[in-house]
């Protein structure tokens, strides 16, 4: 008896396709999950929020304070929608979360400024979520210096903020407008593939055990490798359907500029899809019920989501978390996809991220094959 | 039968799960073309034994061959030649009858697959259900389809684990007719069951309880070996009589069969004396042949005594 027989393998593939077609709920999940996540992550998540509610408590009505406020408006980070009258009111608005920033301009701000006394401009931020405020705060500095350099002219030009001796220019490469969607949508492809493929395959195999069909399958001459690969192939196709959906949405819905080759993305994705499916299958050799398979999948999905650099910048994580992240295929896949789509990377640049996924795949398949029980013991 | 090697020839087969020994050193020889009935109470080790024969479980002890191949090391060679039907329906409920059979045919690498599946569907009169999902079939038809699926690849040995549990009498009769036809064609069958009428349709029987093989032989051999005498008692107030007889010396079993009581015991003179004392006069007492049911219940109650 051969170790691998193509007709037996084809039998498993054909069966899986028919079962997939009959299982409406799973089918809905295959299509529905990417769409829901696209909308949630693509439209709802923004790590560079603008138009934050800002209140002003001003005791000064000089031309300087007015132009500072108008410069803040122009920066588009601040939505100045309220003028406060007292200190207590300011504290209360912040505490209630009705406003993100309170700008306090002290009495005689204009006069002190003209005198060269370096008056204080107080900006209080509700920094419970630092990521919501950090960009706005750095924009504030810029807004103030621009506003004042315009007003401090003629006799007051001595007071103008002294220019840096060096003219620093910053280019935000690959995403000059710092649009979060450009980063999130391509990354989302990896996240969705991880979530659906691991769950679906883990359940597909556990279902055989739960429904008792495993007993029949084991009694036939079908070999473990034929079952494993036979179950993986149909879902690779599922992965590609999901990718098409997301790439399509990225291009036409979110208008992500594609700098590199889309076919290349599809080609390298084989590795990543196979790695996730292998994880799912390996889980199914451990799990006894479909519920356990589901829980194991979540157990794998969470670190993938949090430590891969999808949610938080990879370089910002502590060393041990980076080590875990390096093992996860999603980490490398994100870099590959963002590299190709946003930076226009080619095969030579992505190689260094592709081999860790391949290594992961081989490792997991080996574990899966040894765990696969040829008997019911 | 000495010149033809037995299809199943195992000695001392043992299986332990954790600290519980489920099958304790069972020997079994089954000849070609034989329909071998496998009986025993629930949890007696029948399923475990059958699973060891077809390679689903690895025996912890014992040696033997199945179709001439070692049951420990050559399960890959045994599997293609065996048709196994699990106790629980184990085909795909979300595939149609035809798709299930087609899958099995491909799994066994059957040449001329389409024709073989069509022929099997025809033979088992499954044509009108061929396009229906297996999950929507009734118990009898599911079992029919499962039998069709396990003889599709023309196995030499059928291992059927309680194939007729929960199936109506006429479907059961059809099933057994089918099995006899197959056996006439040279297929050997090992069938576990709880039904006495089915036990009577087997060529030979084995009785296993709590992992021990207690008795083996043809139906009449088992009855003779049990040494039981049985009397039928009819007349008025049978329930009262039954209560009295149950505690009478020499009486081992009392069971009501409609308007008669069947009373059996191993010690024939004592049993006759007990009937003479308690049932003389008002009741009609006739000696009848002991049935397999009495034999098996006797074995279950006194497992120490092997036939």
Image (tube, coloured by chain):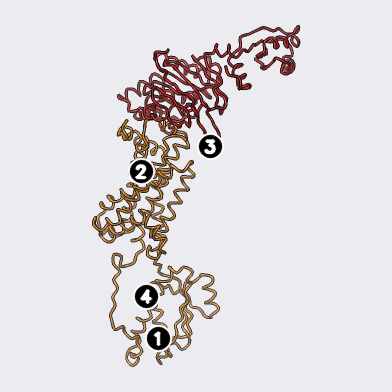
Q: Is residue B204 visible?
A: yes
Label 4 sits on a secondary structure element that is: helix
Which one is in front in this view, the residue at disc 1 or the one at disc 2? 2
Which residue is denoted by mark 3 in the rendering?
A: B18
Of the image marks 1 and 2, the number of the one nearer the N terminus: 1
Which residue is denoted by mark 2 in the rendering?
A: A235
Q: CA distance from mark 4 to mark 3?
A: 75 Å
Q: Nearer the viewer, residue B102 or B185?
A: B185
The relative height of residue B122 versus residue A375 in the rendered view (above or below) is: above
Q: What residue sits 31% from the left and 49% below the top?
A: A271
Q: Position of residue B98 (x, y in %)?
A: 38, 27
Badge 2 sits on which subunit?
A: A
Image disc number at residue A63: 1
Which one is in front in this view, the residue at disc 4 or the one at disc 3? 3
Q: CA distance from mark 1 to mark 2?
A: 66 Å
Q: Which chain is orange?
A: A
Q: Position of residue A119 (x, y in %)?
A: 44, 87
Image disc number at residue A133: none
Q: Is residue B128 visible?
A: no
Of the image marks 2 and 4, the number of the one nearer the N terminus: 4
10 Å crowding of disc 2: few (<14), some (14-19), many (20+):
many
Which one is in front in this view, the residue at disc 1 or the one at disc 3? 3
Which one is in front in this view, the residue at disc 3 or the one at disc 2? 3
- Looking at the picture, do discs 1 and 3 lie on one chain? no
């Amino acid at each position: 008896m051969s170790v691998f027989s193509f007709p037996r393998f084809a039998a498993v593939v054909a069966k899986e396709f028919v079962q997939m077609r009959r299982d409406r709920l799973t089918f809905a999940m295959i299509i529905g999950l990417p769409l829901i996540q696209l909308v949630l992550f693509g439209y709802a998540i923004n790590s560079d929020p603008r138009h934050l509610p800002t209140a002003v408590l001003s005791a000064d009505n000089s031309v300087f304070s007015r132009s500072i406020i108008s410069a803040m408006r122009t920066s588009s980070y601040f939505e100045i929608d309220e003028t406060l009258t007292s200190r207590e009111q300011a504290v209360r608005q912040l505490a209630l979360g009705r406003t993100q920033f309170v700008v306090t301009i002290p009495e005689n701000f204009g006069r002190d400024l003209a005198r060269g006394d370096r008056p204080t401009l107080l900006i209080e931020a509700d920094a419970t979520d630092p990521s919501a405020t950090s960009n706005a705060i750095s924009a504030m500095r810029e807004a103030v210096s621009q506003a004042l350099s315009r007003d401090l002219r003629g006799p007051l030009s001595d007071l103008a903020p002294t220019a840096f001796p060096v003219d620093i220019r910053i280019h935000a490469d690959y995403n000059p407008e710092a649009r979060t969607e450009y980063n999130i949508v391509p990354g989302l492809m990896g996240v969705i593939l991880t979530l659906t493929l691991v769950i679906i395959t883990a359940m597909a195999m556990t279902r055989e055990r739960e429904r008792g069909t495993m007993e029949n399958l084991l009694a036939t001459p079908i070999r473990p490798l034929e079952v494993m690969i036979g179950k993986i192939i149909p879902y690779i196709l599922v992965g590609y359907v999901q990718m098409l959906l997301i790439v399509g949405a990225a291009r036409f819905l979110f208008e992500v500029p594609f700098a590199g080759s889309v076919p290349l993305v599809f080609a390298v994705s084989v590795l990543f899809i196979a790695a996730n499916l292998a994880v799912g299958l390996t889980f199914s050799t451990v799990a006894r019920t479909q519920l356990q398979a589901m829980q194991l999948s979540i157990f794998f999905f969470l670190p993938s989501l949090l430590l891969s650099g999808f949610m938080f910048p990879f370089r910002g994580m502590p060393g041990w978390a980076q080590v875990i992240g390096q093992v996860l295929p999603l980490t490398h896949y994100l870099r590959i996809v963002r590299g190709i789509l946003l930076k226009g990377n080619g095969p030579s640049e992505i190689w260094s991220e592709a081999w860790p996924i391949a290594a992961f795949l081989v490792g997991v398949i080996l574990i899966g094959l040894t765990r696969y029980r040829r008997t019911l013991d | 039968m000495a010149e033809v090697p037995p299809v199943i020839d195992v000695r001392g087969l043992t299986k332990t799960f954790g600290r519980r020994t489920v099958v304790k050193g069972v020997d079994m020889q089954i000849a070609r073309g034989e329909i071998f009935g496998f009986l025993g109470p629930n949890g007696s080790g029948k399923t475990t034994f059958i699973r060891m024969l077809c390679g689903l479980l690895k025996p912890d002890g014992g040696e033997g061959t199945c179709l001439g191949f070692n049951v420990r090391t050559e399960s890959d060679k045994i599997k293609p030649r065996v048709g196994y039907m699990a106790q629980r329906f184990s085909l795909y409920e979300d595939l149609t009858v035809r798709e299930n059979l087609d899958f099995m045919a491909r799994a066994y690498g059957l040449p001329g697959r389409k024709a073989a599946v069509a022929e099997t569907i025809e033979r088992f009169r499954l044509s009108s259900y061929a396009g229906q999902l297996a999950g929507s079939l009734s118990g009898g038809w599911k079992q029919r389809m499962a039998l069709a699926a396990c003889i599709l690849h023309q196995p030499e040995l059928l291992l059927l684990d309680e194939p007729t549990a929960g199936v109506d009498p006429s479907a059961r009769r059809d099933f057994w007719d089918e099995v006899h036809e197959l056996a006439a064609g040279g297929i050997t069958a090992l069938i576990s069951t709880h039904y006495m009428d089915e036990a009577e349709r087997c060529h030979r029987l084995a009785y296993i309880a709590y992992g021990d093989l207690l008795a083996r032989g043809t139906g009449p051999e088992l009855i003779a070996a049990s040494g039981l005498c049985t009397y039928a008692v009819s007349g008025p107030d049978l329930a009262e009589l039954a209560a009295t007889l149950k505690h009478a010396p020499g009486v081992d079993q009392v069971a009501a069969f409609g308007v008669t009581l069947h009373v059996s015991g191993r010690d024939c003179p004592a049993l006759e004396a007990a009937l003479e004392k308690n049932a003389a006069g008002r009741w009609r007492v006739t000696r009848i042949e002991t049935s397999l049911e009495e034999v098996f219940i006797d074995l279950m109650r006194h497992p120490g005594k092997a036939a």
